[in-house]
Image (cartoon, rainbow, N blue to C red):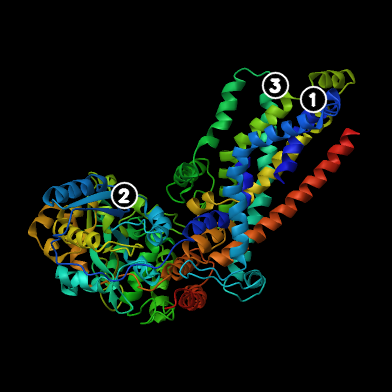
Amino acid sequence: MKKAIARGWGVGLAATVALALAGCAGSNGGGGSVSGDNYDGPKVEITFWHGWTGGAAPTIVPKLIEEFNSEHDNIVVKNVPQEWADIAAKMPLAIKAGKGPDVAVLHGDDLATYAAQKLLLPADDIVKNLGYSADDFPPGVYDKGNYDGSQYAVPWSVTPLGLFVNKDVLSKAGITEIPADKDGYVAALDALKGAGVQGEWVDGYVFTGTFEFESLVWQFGGDLYNKDVTEATFNSDAGVQALTWMTDLVKNGYSPANVAQDGNIKALLAGETAFNWNGVWQTTNTAFGDLDWAAAPVPQIGTEKAVWSSSTHWVFPANKGQSDDKTAAAATFVKWMNDHSLAWAETGELPAANTVREDPELLSTYPALEPFIDELDYAHYETVSPGINEANALITTAINEALTGKKTPKEALDDAKKKADAILEQNKAKYGG
Amino acid sequence: MAADIADAVAVPTERASARSGGRPGSGRRPVARRRRTLIAYLFLAPFLILFGTFVIAPAIFGLWISVTDWSPFRDTQNFVGLTNYLNLFTPGSTTFDDFWQSMGATAIFVVASVPFLVVVPLFVAVLLNRRLKGATVFRTVFFAPYVLGVAIVGVIWSYIFDTQSGILNHVLGLLGLPDDIPWVVDVPWVWVSLVGVTVWWTAGLNTVIFLAGMKGINGDLYEAASLDGAGAWRSFWSVTIPGLRPVMLFITTTTILASANMFGQSYLLTAGGPGNATRTAIMYIADQGLSQNNMAPAAAMSYILFAILAVISVINFRLQRERSEKGAS
């Protein structure tokens, strides 16, 4: 009972406890001089926070760290895995209190939010000393670590969307080739419909309706936000075409209405549908088992090739009183990890370092990754702007409203744009952008 | 409010002890009384310290946040008076529509779920209270879901509720009923699902409390009732229900609070959808305060929610206490 009553005091109050602890937060460290890619200072122990708690990561990460530690006499890396949500809740406060990690991995869409709060060290010098430049990574991803003229991050992995295909179901409609363009895709959906199969189940949730919508917006030549992220543009013609394409899938009978969260990947696995737009991480889904499946680049529905991808990045937290030695050691660790990231493909993510991805061993070990690697030439990554996720959430709401028939695609996107613009404005005041 | 509830539950025993024990301590010397008080506070201290640290202090701090333009990114915070509260009552502000929509969703859920969460457990408790073979087994069965975490509840029911491949629609199809009901995707079904899951999940707790209340009703009363010619129905209304009044007050109060604070079910099952139709106030407050760093408006929202819940609880308490006093006289 006490629990129920205590809850009555409101979640906001719980948050204030956390804030109270942060009350003592001070300013943060400066850039700090960091030596080259091999740390040669006194022996240090560095802590590493990341959110890889599922899949193959819990065995791979400790193995890599153990190997790194044994190769480096003067660096001991302490591995601190925890849920992403816990990292989001704890890390800003921990960094302000000087108790954060020396190195961490963050998702691309969080980088600007952290950088704007001055929680990260500008890493221009670190990156230069490690010898990294944008050319060492897939096009577009390195710049996602750039905020307000400084580089804050080194890419670690990229995870594009792709087309997952149940080949058994596809062959029912007499199709052997996976379609790559709009005409082929519609022809396949029609043939499947003729065979009594709804070919692509479209959903109105982040996973993966939102990713599909964003891919389509870019394919139709639009973008989610304007260049300096002061205005939402996902309600442009391109956006309306993208969302209409999705609602038409239902209208034309290619998709059932009211697909629940994850309903489409379940249906693909159960042999009830042929196509699912889903992330590269699904390649490690053990449920595929002995299903006859394949992955391909997402078909080009719009006027140009484009696909959604997210990314993860190394960052160097600006702990209160951060030691330069530790940051230098962390930089050495980052470089070493990127160089040894081939095994990371085991987790269903693509290593960001070109040298690793171009190593023939990668595809011979993980052949299913090939279509996703091919997509990287035209992949779009998440928008960089502090607090952007609040605006992004409105995109999902719009898709959901359109797919459940509450609003037309245009109405839904226009409404979302109006709110998103207010939030961007608010973010500007909030983060001083 | 907590004290009120404790009173309400403890009424029978306290009344009894007050009667039998006379006026405790009245004949003793003041020093001894003072020492007794001191000892009592000493025993209460551990709880009070925790309560003060984790409930009172954050509550006061939250009140402070709600009158500032609090930002975790600045070193100093500015006092802005009631701006955050006024914004919540100003149509067109960034939070107005969403906040009141989420309050509306919360109200729908409370109104739809509380009657079931009171009546169903009462009914089950009446059945279990008979000298039934295997009553203990049933009691365990009804209580079992309550021990599950909301994450598990969410996963289990998302398999059952899936529109196309869910078990529920499959079974309905076998019975010749519509098999494409969007249980967790579209209104009004989302409300049916959320209420259903919540009843399944938490009814066991209320059942056990009702049962405990029924065990406390003097068996002689039933005997007297039956001698007066009362049937099962009549003795339920005239003996069981009046006997359960303090328990009923407790259950309705805590159930309303729990339903008003619903979060996990809609967060996991419907993701707040369709659109934001099932985004509850707590979901919105948590999102604003914890995810979007809009601490100050979120704190103001939680105080408005708190005020509304406090008023509802007081009204509920007054209504039922009056009835219970009338019933007793």
**Are the residues under badges 1 and 2 in a single subunit?**
no
Name the residue carrying label 2. A81
User: Which numbered disc covers residue A391?
Assistant: none
Gap between marks 1 and 2, in whole Å? Answer: 60 Å
Q: Nearer the viewer, residue B47 or B249?
A: B47
Identified by mark 3, the residue type is: Arg
User: Residue B187's x, y, as percent?
Assistant: 57, 57
Q: Quadrant of the N terminus of chain A?
A: top right
User: Residue A204's x, y, as percent?
Assistant: 44, 62
Identified by mark 1, the residue type is: Ala
User: Residue A351's x, y, as percent?
Assistant: 19, 60
Is A412 drawn above or below residue A316 in the view shown? below
Q: Nearer the viewer, residue A74 or B65?
A: A74
User: Which numbered disc covers residue B232?
Assistant: 1
Name the residue carrying label 3. B130
Q: Disc 3, disc 1: CB below 8 Å?
A: no
Identified by mark 2, the residue type is: Pro
| A169 sits left or right of B21 in the view | left
Label 2 element class? strand
